Image: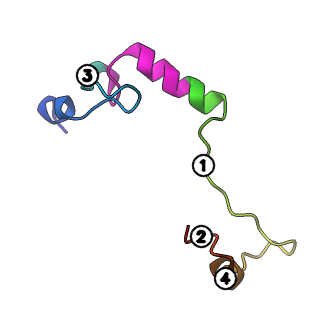
Amino acid sequence: MNKTELKKKTCPICGLPSKYNYRPFCSDRCSNIDLSRWLGETYAVPVVQLEETGELKLDKLIQDNSILS
């Protein structure tokens, strides 16, 4: 990805055009806001809980619609 393509993208925090030095953000401030959200657990990666046996029950998850939503 070159600098021209990056300028077309917008900052995911404030919506201003992103800057090459802070990509994908527009500034150090927006970068720090994003980091703070991750550290404060505002963002989270979803996980699938395993059954007690340690096996993933795919059929049950599909029926519960857990992985489709």
* Most foreground residue, 24 or 12: 12
**With 13 as the anchor, is 15 left or right in this view?**
left
| Rendered location of residue 25, percent (x, y) | 35, 26
Mark 2 vs 3, N-terminal side = 3
Q: Gap in Å between the C-alphas at discs 1 and 2? A: 13 Å
- Give yes or no for contact between labels 2 and 3 (Cβ–Cβ under 8 Å): no
Look at label 3 and name its amino acid. Answer: Lys
Residue displayed at 27% across by 26% down: 18
Q: Which mark is residue 67?
A: 2
Q: Which residue is mark 1?
A: 45
Q: Which residue is mark 3?
A: 19
Q: Nearer the viewer, mark 3 or mark 4?
A: 4
Q: Gap in Å between the C-alphas at discs 4 and 1? A: 22 Å
Q: Gap in Å between the C-alphas at discs 3 and 4? A: 45 Å
Mark 4 vs 1, N-terminal side = 1
**With 49 as the anchor, is 41 left or right in this view?**
left
Residue 52's image quarter?
bottom right
Look at label 2 and name its amino acid. Answer: Ile
Q: Gap in Å between the C-alphas at discs 2 and 3? A: 36 Å
